[in-house]
Amino acid sequence: MPTLRSLHVGALDRFRDRPALTFAGRVTTYAELVDAANRLAHVLVAAGVSPGTPVAIMMANCTEWVVADQAIIRAGGAKVPVNDMLAEREIEFVLRDSGAVVALADEKLAPAARAAGVPLVIEVGPQWDAAVASAPAGGPPAVDVGEDDVGLIMYTGGTTGRQKGVVHTQRGLAVNLLAHLVEMGLGDDERLLITAPLPHSAGFLTQAGLLKGAHHLLEAGFDADTVLDRIDRDRATFLFMVPTMIYRVLDAAERREVDLSSLRTILYGAAPITRERLEQGLRRLGPVFMQLYGQTEAPNFLTRLTREEHDPAHPDRLSSCGRAATLVEIAVLDADGLPVPTGEVGEICARAPYVMRGYHGLPEKTAETLRGGWLHTGDIGRIDADGYVHLMDRANDMIITGGLNVYSTEVENVLAACTGVGQVAVVGIPHPDWGEAVVAFVVPGPDGFDEATAVARCRAELGGYKRPKAYREVTAQPVTAFGKVDKKALRAGWPGW
């Protein structure tokens, strides 16, 4: 069985003179990428990194992010990707909980790594350049990486408010990467446009693209007009976006003349596309849409809705997230872990060779999530007679806003500590642009609710995408028959944007 390291080492050498990525106008060839990654891998090994040692990547999208990712793979370390949109408190937790011994960081996040006590911080710039230049040239360091060594600790929010480190092994990551190649259907001349954050799904897609010799057009962030430029001028063939981004690109395309004929695939996730927008996209772009459904616990591909299945003549399929991916088994189970009849509602559960090993330092939560040999996704849904998976609700109160996951409990815990907050419930309200928007319903305390105080506290303790977009004062929280806050009632009572 291959490891993540064995898949990459040597494979990228086949494409030596091809462009591996373009960022900020600078083209990096595969030979240059491999050389820089091998050198940085030697630096990591000299610093004490061995198979399974946690190494954090802390930077926005840039060439150095891809170099760092490849270096960790070649050193056999366990990557700990840190989203630069997190608040300082959240970053500190990730670094301390993972036990990262090295942080590869940009100027913005390096101070946070030092403040968290990471033993070695290599900062992009003169320090980075000197470390790479002084390292041995040639091949990667000789390290013995095993299938069961940890290759990734990826943090996600939690229903208790504590972030969880999702642990993946070298074997699981290797199979997952091969699954990406199968499901993405990449050609040999692909030009991938990457505008989403590399610490999330885009990082997996980039690894798959590198194994195919693709040219990655990397952007620091998303901008609709830039996306159109990359298709029109740079002939991008493959995009990865969330529906919010797709809508903005379609709107921008209505305002200008662009040649979009190079585009073959728009892979998206987080939510279905509305029928109206899909029809608009099909008219403008052709049959290019492909949907994925996955989780950090089983990255990206649990199900897939193919290009051919994005057919307005079958609206029932368009409301689904597709059918089980090639290596995946999907079931709908009841509260006792038993399958429900076809078409009935229960919890979506999955089996795949790339499901996580568990949660870092959380054995009880691991056992709960992986009970009965199934990954319990926390998503409520059904499977129809043709095998299409329809998501109905989320059992764990997770909100997906702009393609990013927000656990409502995490936000509630921050707001509950604010003076003037008697009770608080955080829900995702459907939003025409973001998919869902984070909204806080607050029962004021005896001294009254001060929104400015709540906003300031959330700004200090939560990443920007987790902060409520709106606050609404209520006299009491509605409750279910079981005495829990009725979040469906809160959503139903929302007056609109």
Image: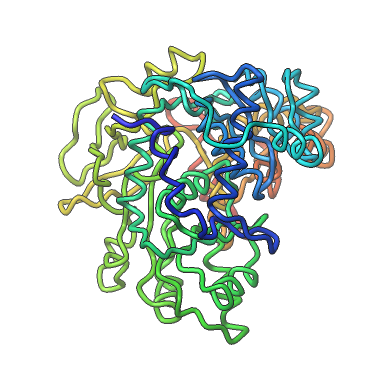
Q: Is residue 353 visible?
A: yes
Instruction: Please state the horizontal and vertical placement of residue 370, each as a whole percent of the image.
Output: 34, 22
Q: Is residue 376 above or below residue 203?
A: above
Image quadrant holding the N terminus, namely top left
Position of 470 with respect to 335 (left or right) is: right
Position of 443 with respect to 393 (left or right) is: right
Report the number of discs: 0
Q: Is residue 389 above or below residue 118?
A: below
User: What colour scheme has been applied to the protein in the rendered image?
Assistant: rainbow
Q: Going 59% across and 39% down the picture, which residue do you hit?
A: 37
Q: Going 79% across and 42% down the picture, which residue do you hit?
A: 125
Instruction: Please state the horizontal and vertical placement of residue 56, each as a whole percent of the image.
Output: 63, 29
Q: Is residue 493 visible?
A: no
Position of 341 with respect to 36 (left or right) is: left
Instruction: Please state the horizontal and vertical placement of residue 278, each as a whole percent of the image.
Output: 41, 71
Q: Going 57% across and 61% down the picture, which residue do you hit?
A: 217
Give 130 or 101, whichever is nearer the viewer: 130
Q: Is residue 28 above or below residue 142?
A: below
Image quadrant holding the C terminus, namely bottom right
Residue 421, quarter of picture: top right
Q: Is residue 192 above or below residue 59?
A: below
Instruction: Please state the horizontal and vertical placement of residue 128, each as a whole percent of the image.
Output: 74, 37
Give 217 or 484, whichever is nearer the viewer: 217
Give 232 or 399, whichever is nearer the viewer: 232
Q: Going 75% across and 40% down the picture, which residue do you hit?
A: 129
